Amino acid sequence: MKRIFAAFAVAGLLLNFTQARAQEQELPSVLSVSPSTVGSNSTTTVLVRGNGFVEGDTVQLSGCPVTNAQAVYPVPQVQIVDATTMLVTTPNIIPAGTCTLTVGRSSLPAALTFADAPERLTVQITNDTSVTDEQLWITLGYNCPRAITSPPYPPGSDGCNVDGRSNMQYDWPPTLSGTNANKYWYEVYSDDSLIPAFTGIRFSDLAPVAGQAQTREFAVANIDSGVVYISQGSPVNTGASPIGRAPSYVTSKTRFDAFELTFHGSAQGSWASPVYANITAVAGVSMLMNLSGWDNSIGSHGPAPRQIGTGVSWRKGATTDGIVTTLRAAGVNVDDTSVVVTTDDKPYRTTNFLRIVSPSTNGGSGYARLGGSKRSYLAWLTRQQKRFKVVGLYSGSGAGAGTWYCYRSNVFTRTSPTALTGSYGYATRAAARAASRSGCTATGTATAGPKIVTATTPVSGVTGSVTPAAVYMQDNRYLQDGVIATGNDLANAIYRDFIVSFAYGYWGSRSGSSGWTTLTWGTAKGSVPAFSPGWPAFKRGVAFPRWNAYAESIWKFTNAYGMPYSDTFGNGGRGNPLVSGSAISTLRLGVVG
């Protein structure tokens, strides 16, 4: 039988039924049921409101579609919360169609509609670490804040069709929810058991996968976005807030790591790829995890499941010790506990390791500074008195969508703002490159774009200068035509390419894979090598790196994100490490170290 989930009624779609009081005053009156639409062949808890509910009230389903003339439906599970609130868990053998709900002598014709729903996404986790299944914990943070009534269902829209014990208004009875109003907000299942958000579950309590050693699974119904935390020894503290809180990579004394997930159901609406997942090392690294997407929709009697895409993986033999060693060789102070967090707050040893914190998270603490000293990167760039040129393809929406742009900076200095001006609308990269040779002024059908000015953390009282923290954190605050802007548009893409080029070490590096004779001041020049390969003659790279040493060290071991925007520029990053595809029905996560 296919694993299917209950389709939750859309927000505000609450069927109200006013009932005349039964003959005897003490009999209950049922006023409303939510959700009114649930999945066939799956159990779903619905909220029934009325008055006069008491323990022992009988609840029945009748008038449901019949598969044979003698069909008798099981009595639903009932939990009386108080005189006005009841939870009813439906049986899992109701075929598609409508049913009458009866509480005592009060009946609601067509109160519940059972409907087919998309398959769930299965997430299988394999524990290949030295930690036992009982010591490994899974904590899920996810949300589906409101329902969208019709397709398409875009990611980031703050809504989706949800199911199960969901409640978008956070108004479940306090006697049930306590201080965490998400207690009955379920979108994740282990077998038929519902797993609440922000509540840890032992790995050993998940459903085992037959025939796969140390592998267990859960199923995701339909969420807007979520994070799955894997931790050792105890669940991570997601906080008392009803919406939870991400554990800190800097202060948490629990060893944990995470992967990110978006799931919009099986090709709902116009969605070609309903599954988006990734493992990121942007915040830091604590455990090594591989992630891949698989199509097993053909069933157990068909060919073997096939992998979709390349997935995210760590090099065979990679260890956290190896990453720390590589960082030390790159000049990082790994004895600084803001770089390598330890169990006892003492300098790093193999036995006290918790996690490596990236400069994107700790602001560069413990990492070689990119500014300050005259030998530092930003000071060196200032002495060159050069303008930077950025040529790129804008693949987003709005002005300039699908076209190439060309922007040029003023003469760079680390103590004053950098202004970028240029044009967009070029049909080819060659046309944008040609414009870069004449100052990026609009030519042909191109359009002059907005002026962009850096607006990062002040240096020496001058607002807007590019700082080491801005480079490490990929600060996306900038001025667009004189106004602070952070929109996901053409200007954001241009500024992103400008600021990320510092982390790659593009500005002033050697411009090509052969010759190594021309310094690069633009992203338009051929194949620009990232990180240390772009500086083959630079002898003081350890003391004064001219790139993000953390990102380079991480990418020696994995294709996971090593810094923000690491999927920009095909020659500098490792491509886009998203696990995504229209045919993915299973995500496989391997916790390997």
Image (cartoon, grey):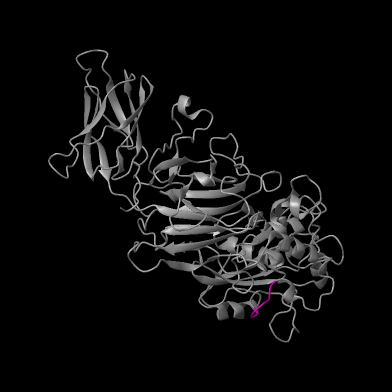
Q: Nearer the viewer, residue 554 or 207?
A: 207
Residue 442 image point, x, y percent: 58, 73
Q: Which residues are magenta?
A: 525-530
Q: Is residue 272 above or below residue 353?
A: below
Membership of 442 in magenta stretch: no
Query: Can residue 532 be spotted in the picture?
Result: yes
Main secondary-structure element of the magenta-colored stretch: loop
The residue lying at 55 percent from left, 66 percent from top is 576
Q: Nearer the viewer, residue 469 or 480?
A: 469
Query: Is residue 586 found left or right of 269 in the rendered image?
Result: right
Query: Is residue 416 found left or right of 587 in the rendered image?
Result: right
- Among all residues in the image, which is located at the extreme right? 374
Quadrant for residue 435, please give it: bottom right
The residue lying at 60 percent from left, 54 percent from top is 486
Residue 579 image point, x, y percent: 50, 62
Query: Can residue 467 be spotted in the picture?
Result: no
- Among all residues in the image, which is located at the extreme left? 69
The residue lying at 30 percent from left, 42 percent from top is 92
Residue 320 image point, x, y percent: 69, 59
Membership of 528 in magenta stretch: yes
